[in-house]
Every structure is written in structure tokens, then in C-alpha cells.
Image (tube, rainbow, N blue to C red):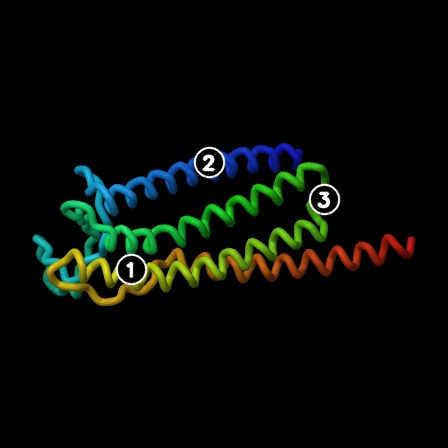
């Protein structure tokens, strides 16, 4: 029964990996268009804008402190510089997600052969690799995304925007990476203890 669930989970995650790769290729194609050909209608660079006027009024006893929005800016004509910083904005988090998903799929593929294969040094290695991918990827994504966002805002908007804090998903990925490292160490020590017990029997 457990093997069936592992098989189904592997199929779902493999499908997600394929769709993620297709999405990355689509974003790469849009980046190439921005760099060399100019963008078509509907294709642009998403940017965060702060202090946006809102056409609504708060109820008595409340006040609107701040308002922010996401706008899609379309450069007119080819813009290699904008394409470069746009690439730095989306590529690191996308690569981190795809590498993490690929690592999980590999671990599940090995786990299909039985419980002993799931609880093994190889699984601990996969978890450790997953943890470092998430930690390093989230840190790189936070830095590159924040810097690219600020530079693109200065290039494409009349009023440049301040540095935005990293999105909440970055912190989630960082915590998930630390958890994966912790679980990998638990599995590794458990495998060592199991091998010692089997050796004494």
C-alpha cells in the first residue's frame, strides 16, 4: 500500500517537474524577446510599486496606511540590460525549485524498491542535498531578486522603488532546507544504528 502511494506521489511530482521545466523555457523565451526583439503585447516585467493611490475610502475609525501593487512593464524595443536583470529576478528561484523537485523525485524513485531502500544512507544523502539546494537557492534568490527589482524599477519607472524585502516563500524555503538537513542527519544516524544492530545479530 505504501509503495502505491509512493508511486502516485512520484508521478504527480514528475508531472510538476515537467510543467515547471516548460514554464522555465517559456520565461526564458520571454527574456530573449525582451533582450533582442522587443516584447509582444501581454509580455512584460513584473515590478512592485508602493504608495499606490486607491479609489476607496476606509470606514470611520480606520485608515489606509499604505497600498502596494504589482505592475507589468513592457519595454519598448529591445532592451538587453532589462532582460539581464529580469533573468536575475526569476531564474534563481525557478532553478532552486526545479532542482529541489528533481532531488525529491530521485529519492522517491529509489524508495519504490522497499522500506529498506527508503531508510538508507542514499536517502539521507538525497535529503542533505535537498537541504543545501533550498538553503543556497533561497539565499541567492533573495539577494538577486531584491537587487534586480530595485535596478529594474529605476530603469523602467519614473520613480524608482525602494528595496523590497524578499517574499515570504524565500523564508519558507530556507526553513524547509534546514528541516531537510535535520531529517537527513536523523536518517543517517538511524541507518548507522540499524547496521550495528544487524551486525550483532
Mark 3 or mark 1: which is in front?
1
Residue at image point 16% right, 64% down: 160
Q: Earlier in the sequence, mark 2 or mark 1?
A: 2
The disc label shown at residue 117, or none? 3
Q: Secondary structure at mark 1?
A: helix
Q: Quadrant of residue 54?
A: bottom left
Tell me: residue 39, above or below residue 92.
above
Q: Dot 1, crowdedness within 10 Å: few (<14), some or many (≥20)?
A: many
Horizontal and vertical percent for residue 123? 66, 50
Tell me: residue 163, above or below residue 197.
below
Tell me: residue 4, above or below residue 155.
above
Using the numbered discs, state the Cα–Cα distance from disc 3 to disc 2 in whole angstroms. 25 Å
Closer-to-camera residue (190/94): 94
Please name the residue that numbered disc 1 is placed on: 148
Is 172 placed left or right of 200 in the picture? left
Please name the residue that numbered disc 2 is placed on: 18
Q: Earlier in the sequence, mark 3 or mark 2?
A: 2
Q: Quadrant of residue 199?
A: bottom right
Residue at image point 50% right, 57% down: 176
Is 59 placed left or right of 128 in the picture? left
Furthest residue to the front? 36
Using the numbered discs, state the Cα–Cα distance from disc 2 to disc 1 in whole angstroms. 27 Å
Horizontal and vertical percent for residue 72? 20, 48
Closer-to-camera residue (116/152): 152
Closer-to-camera residue (190/126): 126
Q: Secondary structure at mark 3?
A: helix
Horizontal and vertical percent for residue 55? 8, 53
Amino acid at each position: 500500500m505504501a509503495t502505491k502511494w509512493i508511486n502516485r506521489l512520484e508521478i504527480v511530482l514528475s508531472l510538476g517537474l515537467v510543467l515547471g521545466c516548460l514554464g522555465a523555457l517559456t520565461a526564458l523565451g520571454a527574456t530573449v524577446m525582451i533582450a533582442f526583439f522587443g516584447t509582444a503585447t501581454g509580455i512584460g516585467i513584473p515590478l512592485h510599486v508602493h504608495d499606490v493611490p486607491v479609489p476607496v475610502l476606509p470606514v470611520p475609525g480606520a485608515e489606509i496606511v499604505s497600498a502596494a501593487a504589482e505592475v507589468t512593464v513592457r519595454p519598448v524595443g529591445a532592451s538587453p540590460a532589462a532582460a539581464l536583470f529580469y533573468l536575475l529576478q526569476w531564474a534563481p528561484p525557478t532553478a532552486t525549485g526545479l532542482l529541489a523537485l528533481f532531488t525529491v523525485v530521485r529519492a522517491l524513485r529509489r524508495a519504490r524498491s522497499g522500506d529498506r531502500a527508503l531508510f538508507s544512507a542514499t536517502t539521507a544523502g538525497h535529503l542533505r542535498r535537498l537541504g543545501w539546494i533550498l538553503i543556497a537557492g533561497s539565499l541567492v534568490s533573495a539577494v538577486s531578486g531584491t537587487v534586480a527589482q530595485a535596478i529594474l524599477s529605476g530603469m523602467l519607472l519614473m520613480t524608482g522603488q525602494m528595496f523590497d524585502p524578499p517574499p515570504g516563500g524565500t523564508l519558507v524555503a530556507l526553513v524547509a532546507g534546514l528541516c531537510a538537513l535535520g531529517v537527513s542527519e536523523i536518517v543517517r544516524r538511524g541507518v548507522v544504528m540499524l547496521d550495528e544492530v544487524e551486525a550483532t545479530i
